[in-house]
Amino acid sequence: MPQRSENIEKICILGGGTAGWMTAAALSHKLKGLPIRIELVESDEIGTVGVGEATLPLIRNFNEALNIDEATFMRETEATFKLGIEFCNWGRSGDRYIHPFGDYGRPIDGLPFYQAWLRLRQLGDTSRLDEYAYSIIAAEHARFQRPSADHTAIDGGFGYAYQFDSSRYAQFLRRYAEARGVIRTEGKVAETQCDSESGFVRSLTLGNGKTAAADLFIDCSGFRGVLIEQALKTGYDDWSHWLPCNRAIAVPCESRGVFAPLTRATAREAGWQWRIPLQHRVGNGHVYCSSFISDDEATTQLLENLESPALAAPRQLFFTTGRRRKFWNRNVVAIGLSAGFLEPLESTSIHLIQEGITELLQLFPDKSFSTLDADEYNARMGLAFERVRDFLLLHYVANQREQGDLWLHFQNLKLPDSLDEKIKAWMTRGHIIAYQFGTFLPPSWLAVFLGQNLVPRGYDPRVRKIDDDQLRTEARRLRDAVQAAVERTPEHADFIRQVGAGSGSAPIMAGMI
Ligand SMILES: Cc1cc2nc3c(=O)[nH]c(=O)nc-3n(C[C@H](O)[C@H](O)[C@H](O)COP(=O)(O)OP(=O)(O)OC[C@H]3O[C@@H](n4cnc5c(N)ncnc54)[C@H](O)[C@@H]3O)c2cc1C
């Protein structure tokens, strides 16, 4: 009698948004050669959220792991390069800073450069820390090139990401996944069949009469959470008391040559507005809290602040910030919006999709579905969500704005302990508690702390061992090196054309932000 295989033989991915097709593409590539069939079910009638255009540097690892050619990907998705995020009006009205995907200066005697800068500042030096960050100065001049191969060079060792058309990315990955054997089934789930004893999901019945059975189900059905919530009733931790924004209006507008490699987030009266430049258009949106502004006012504020005519009618989106209590429950793993949602202030959702896929591949189950694997997955993803939440919250609580009920609300908020400790360590002597896991490394925290006027009282005492004149000389040398490197850097738009990444569908003009 043939032995029953314990290996997973069939995977069903429910949902064909960014999460569904990223998962399908990654699994079809990484599980290639194994006798595992992958089916993706999606409903044309329901469609996708259709936003999600700004990313973090690790997306490059995802594309590289799938052997996706960068220039082809950029042409197909109308992508631009991204060196960081520009924040306007966050500390106080009129403030502006960039969170770069790279470090400031270079370590001096094993200490991060910013510690030397804090000392110089106390000695009366007036240079901005930004002047030591190649990525910031290059972005401010709308210039871009890939990092130098020499990681220790002033223009080496920085990260970059992309801004792209998310629907085109999903379609691009769909072609990739289908070419590697993924079967797409169109239809809307009408019923989910679960095992009466174990509660495991066994199959889906679609409205058109088709069925999809599998050993492992990946729920990429978006905010609905068709399997993880509607079928398994997993529960959701609502984080609205920390991050109360709950709605967004999105609208694209014409590209008019404003083309710096940056996403912009501008604080508004009851939320903030994003601006994401792509090759063929600019994506815009207003994220806001409905307790502090009406939908009509939020829409008007967005439309009044567009730089060019809108290309479509504004679309409204509703969300509740938080995370699913378990990301992996029984034989269902939730990836994407079904796993949870944190507002797109630091472009983290697609990154969390990528983390979900990576962890799933590392802990890939067999049919016995060990609870140890699920527990480990849930612990890792829980930490990833919490640390992003703390980082987002920092932007709100470190505000000194004098108006706007939303902003005043944050000035008196009781913080999660994890964030409270991080801020206290920073404020005493500029120490940034580094996490073993977590998306954002110390330079990112540094950018937001200083960008929002949280200047520490002291600095690392070891800096005093370095001669003050030596510090000044080194600082000047670094500033000059940054300037010289930026002057050698091509315009962002020219670089896109040079590397063959331009779509050619729209003229690209360079310009300052
Ligand atoms: C306002 C806003 C701005 C954002 N900006 C960014 C950003 O800049 N950067 C970033 O990284 N992320 C951003 N995100 C998040 C990003 O959009 C999502 O993470 C990403 O699009 C993934 O969505 P998804 O695939 O999980 O869900 P969806 O796009 O909603 O896809 C769900 C899929 O499930 C299918 N489905 C649902 N129910 C059923 C059913 N019953 N039967 C069959 N199929 C079904 C749908 O047809 C669809 O194919 C933003 C999100 C919002 C709300």
Image: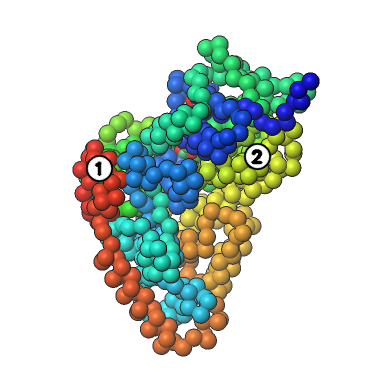
Occupied quadrant, residue 5: top right
From where the camera sits, is residue 417 visible? yes
Q: Mark 1 sits on what residue?
A: 255
Q: Judge from the rendering whether residue 368 lies leftward or rightward of residue 497; answer left or right.
A: right
Amino acid identity at mark 1: Ser
Instruction: Locate the C terminus by quadrant.
Output: bottom left
Type of residue at label 2?
Phe
Task: Residue 447 in the image: state x and y as whole percent.
Answer: 45, 63
Q: Residues within 10 Å of mark 2 (few under 14, many from 20)?
A: some
Q: Secondary structure at mark 1?
A: loop
- Residue 160 is situated, as x and y percent measured from the top left of the image, at 40, 54
Q: Is residue 293 left or right of residue 321?
A: left
Q: Which residue is mark 2?
A: 364
Label 1, label 2: how far apart the Cα atoms are: 43 Å
Q: Is residue 424 above or below residue 193?
A: below
The count of marks equals 2
Position of the N terminus, as image quadrant, is top right
